[in-house]
Amino acid sequence: MTPQITRINTNKNLLAFSAGVDSTALFFILLENNIPFDMAIVNYNIREQSQEEIQYAEKLAKKYNKEIYIKNVQLENLSNFEKKARDIRYDFFEEIIEQFSYETLITAHQLNDKLEWFFMQLSKGAGLAELISFEEYKNNGSYNIFKPLVNTSKNVLLKYLDENNIKYFTDQSNFEGKYKRNYFRKNYANKFLDEFELGVKNSFDYLQKDLNSLSINQSPILEKKELTIFNSFEDNNLNLRIIDKNLKKRGILLSKLQRDEILKQKEIVISHKICINLTKKYIFISPFINTTMTKKFKEKCRVIKLPKNIRPYIFNENLFEDTYKIIKN
C-alpha cells in the first residue's frame, strides 16, 4: 500500500484521529514514513465505547511521543447530528491549528468516502466540479488540508491493520441507515467498490484531468477583506463553479435550487449571509449587511452601476476606490 504520504512536506501536522479503521491505519502509515504529526480527537459521548477510543488514542500518543488534543462534547439535541458533529470537529481542529501554528490538517478520508460523496452529489443534481470536489489536497487559507488515503479503499486499510495486528475500533453508528451518508455507504459505495475498485480509481483520475484541462483562469480580479470580484463568462456553468468554489471557502454549500436562483435573479442573498451578483462582466461576492449610506456614496455607486446589495459592505469597509479601479473600464 503506497498512499501519497510523501506529499506531506510540512513539519507541523495535525492528524484528525478517531481510533477507527481509517485514522488508525493512517496513524501507523505516517509513523512508517517518518512524517511528524500530533493528534486531535473529539468524544461526542453518545456511544459506550467512545471512552475506550479516547483511552486508546491517549495510549498511542504516549507510546509514540505525540501531543494529543481531546474535546469532550455533550449534545442535548441529536437531530442533524452529522452536520453538528462535523462543525464541532472542524471548529476544534481550527482552534488547535491557530493556537499552536500547525501547517497541515491530515484527515483519513479514503476511497469509499470519496465514492459516497460522488453518489450523494449525483443524487442532488451536481455538476462535474461538485462530483469530484473531494480533493486530496486543499489550501484552506492559513493551513492545508491533506487526505492521503483518498485513492486507497477501506478493504486495503483493513487488510493492512489485520496483517500488522493493529488494534482499531468499529463505530457501529456507521451502519445505522438513519444517517444519509451511511445509506449511500451501505447500499451503493461499498458494494460498488468491492466489484469495480480499479475502474473507480481510474475514472476519478480521468475526471480530474478532464476538469483541469477545462479550467479557465478563475482567479479573482479583486480580493479585499471579504469582498471578492471575478470576471464573469458566457458559460453559466463556469460562473456557477466559480461562485460555488468561493462560497465553499466561506463555509456555504449551494443547493441546486440556490444555483438556479442565482442564474435566474442575478442578484441574490444566500442564507441571509452572502451577497452574490452576476453581471455581464463581473461576479461580485461579499457579506450581506445593513447599514446607512450617504447620498453621495449611493450616487457614486449608481453611476458605475454597482449592484445594490453589496453597496452596504463596500461602504462599511471603505472599499469603493478599490472596486472603482477594477470596474471603471
Image (cartoon, rainbow, N blue to C red):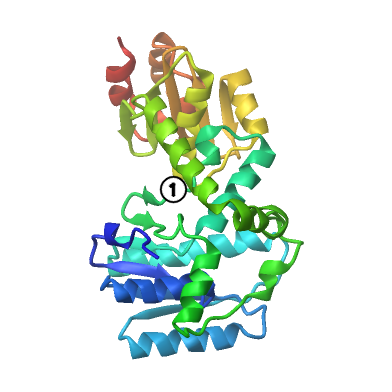
At horizontal 44% and vertical 48% (from top left) the residue drawn is 135
Q: Is residue 137 above or below residue 241?
A: below
Q: Nearer the viewer, residue 118 or 291?
A: 118
Q: Quadrant of the C terminus?
A: top left
x, y (%) of residue 108?
A: 46, 64
x, y (%) of residue 3?
A: 38, 61
Q: Residue furthest right?
A: 178
Q: In this view, does 261 lie to the left or right of 100?
A: right
Q: Give neighbour class at mark 1: few <14, some 14-19, many 20+ (Cα, 10 Å).
A: few
How many numbered discs sit on the rendered protein? Answer: 1
Q: In which quarter of the image is residue 176?
A: bottom right
At horizontal 56% and vertical 22% (from top left) the residue drawn is 267
x, y (%) of residue 275?
A: 52, 31
Q: Is residue 300 above or below residue 106?
A: above
Q: Can residue 292 be seen in this view?
A: no
Q: Nearer the viewer, residue 264 or 47?
A: 47
Q: In this view, does 300 lie to the left or right of 111?
A: left
x, y (%) of residue 239?
A: 48, 24
- Residue type indicated by callout 1: Glu
Q: Is residue 169 left or right of residue 57?
A: right
Q: In which quarter of the image is residue 49?
A: bottom right
Residue at mark 1: 135
SS at mark 1?
loop
At horizontal 50% and vertical 66% (from top left) the residue drawn is 156
Q: Which of 272 and 167 is in front in this view?
A: 167
Q: In which quarter of the image is the N terminus?
A: bottom left
At horizontal 60% and vertical 40% (from top left) the residue drawn is 271
Q: Can residue 206 be seen in this view?
A: yes
